[in-house]
Amino acid sequence: MLGAIDWILVIAVLLFITGFILIGIEMVTPGLHAPGMIGTVCLLVGIFLVSDTLVEGAIITLIVLALLGIMLAVILGMLSKGKLKSPIILKEEQNKDKGYISSNDLKFLLGKQGIASTDLRPSGTGNFDGIELDVISEGKYITKNTTLVIYKVQGSKLIVKAVE
């Protein structure tokens, strides 16, 4: 049968495991807050249950922080290599009528003509068929209400020039 100290150790280990899992969930899907907060509380309670002295508590805290750093590095590596699906990056178009367009493939906008909604110094906003888009001229100042054409797409950047 387990003694009182053994049960405290078992509870602390379960708290550590739960804390790491919950913080891992928060790292993959940031913004939920509840898993991160509950995981942090689990880790802190686990540290208090395991440590006998202040120095021992500080050492365990440093070990936990190092493990969290390793977890973050592994998760970021998996996200950057596409092994995990990132909930942060917009992959598809979302409400195209209001101008919110993902940056997957904007090549379909090449040659589209519109009007400068703001002065381009060199960046600003252009109206293309009723959709406001952020655009950039190649270093040239273009005044408001000038007719524009999108002649180059670099990733999510729309490069425009004035139509003459």
Image (spheres, rainbow, N blue to C red):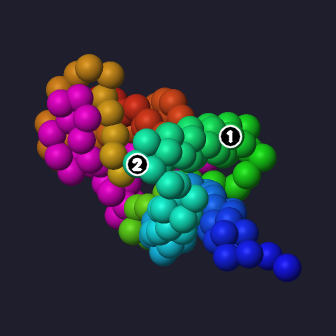
Is 60 positioned to the left or the right of 132 in the image?
A: right
For the C terminus, the image quarter is: top left
From this viewpoint, is residue 106 visible?
no
Q: Residue at x 26, y 20 (%)?
A: 139
Q: Quadrant of residue 160?
A: top left
Residue 154 screen position, x and y as percent: 51, 30
| N-term-proximal mark, 2 vs 1 | 2
Rendered position, 83 above or below 99: above
Q: Which one is nearer the viewer's eye here, 68 or 91?
A: 68
Q: Which one is nearer the viewer's eye here, 36 or 161?
A: 36
Q: Which residues are magenta?
A: 103-132
Taking the view exactly as shown, the residue that stands out farthest to the bottom is 1
Q: Residue at x 57, y 59 (%)?
A: 50
Q: Secondary structure at mark 1?
A: helix
Q: Which one is nearer the viewer's eye here, 47 or 100?
A: 47
Query: Callout 1 environment at 10 Å: few (<14), some (14 to 19), or many (20+)?
Result: few
Instruction: Residue under label 2, please give it.
Output: 54
Residue 113 screen position, x and y as percent: 40, 45
Residue 64 screen position, x and y as percent: 56, 47
Taking the view exactly as shown, the residue that stands out farthest to the top is 139
Is 42 positioned to the left or the right of 77 in the image?
A: left
Disc 1 marks which amino acid? Val
* CA gap, disc 2 and disc 1: 30 Å
Q: Is residue 53 magenta?
A: no
Instruction: Residue under label 1, please give it.
Output: 74
Rendered position, 164 above or below 66: above
Q: Residue at x 72, y 69 (%)?
A: 6
Residue 109 screen position, x and y as percent: 52, 46
Query: Callout 2 environment at 10 Å: few (<14), some (14 to 19), or many (20+)?
Result: few
Disc 2 marks which amino acid? Leu
On residue 110, the disc is: none
